[in-house]
Image: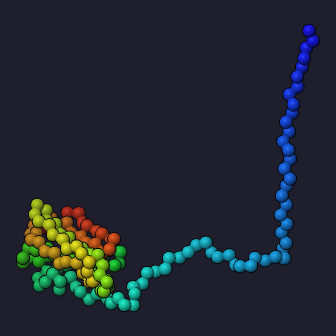
Amino acid sequence: MPTVTTTAPSIRPTPRPTRTTVVNPDNKPSKTPKPTTTRKKEVKPSKSLKANTASATSLCGAGYAIINSHALAGHATVYLLYNAGAGMNCVVTISRYVHPNKVNMSAILQVKGGASANDPGTFTAYAGPVRLPAKKKCVIWGGAWNSYVWKSEWSHCT
């Protein structure tokens, strides 16, 4: 019997035509490309906003002294005050500017093993004051201005 040999057909890739781009050096771009980086503009208060002149000591009352404060991203400051004669703490959140359309703000105070108080709402200039007796007791204090919120750990225990 004769031997039959089969050869597999060879497959060759079909060459693709190459694409040639012709650039004319005399053609200039019609527009200058814009830079890809952008700078954030500093947010400045509207000219209709006035600086807030309220003070934490005047809001809490006679005998109170500031013992701590915390800034809320430059928009407001939360103050913790203490009246040694009365053994009372006071917290106020004071906006940097007076906002005629009102802003969400709050002031909070919590006494360890005791009461807690807060003053949330929409205000033009400040939230609070909130006052609680806290002689020789730790407190948590804090506040908020719009979406900026801050709250302390237990502190000021003496």
Residue 106: quarter of image: bottom left
Q: Where is residue 95 in the image (x, y as percent from the top left)?
A: 29, 81
Q: Position of residue 137 (x, y in %)?
A: 11, 65
Indicate the quadrant containing the C terminus: top left, top right, bottom left or bottom right.
Answer: bottom left
**Can residue 45 be seen from the camera position used here?**
yes
**Can residue 70 be seen from the camera position used here?**
no
Q: How many labels does the image show?
A: 0
Q: Position of residue 156 (x, y in %)?
A: 17, 68
Q: Which residue is painted at 23% across and 63% down in the image?
A: 153
Q: Where is residue 80 in the image (x, y as percent from the top left)?
A: 20, 74
Horizontal arrangement in the rendering, residue 136 relative to residue 67 (left or right): left
Q: Residue furthest top?
A: 1
Residue 81: quarter of image: bottom left
Q: In this view, does 152 lie above or below 44?
A: above
Q: Residue furthest left?
A: 86
Q: Which residue is painted at 14% across and 67% down in the image?
A: 116
In terms of depth relative to the viewer, which is nearer, 60 or 138? 60
Q: Which residue lies furthest to the front in this view?
A: 1
Horizontal arrangement in the rendering, residue 96 relative to residue 129 (left or right): right
Q: Is residue 121 above or below residue 7?
A: below
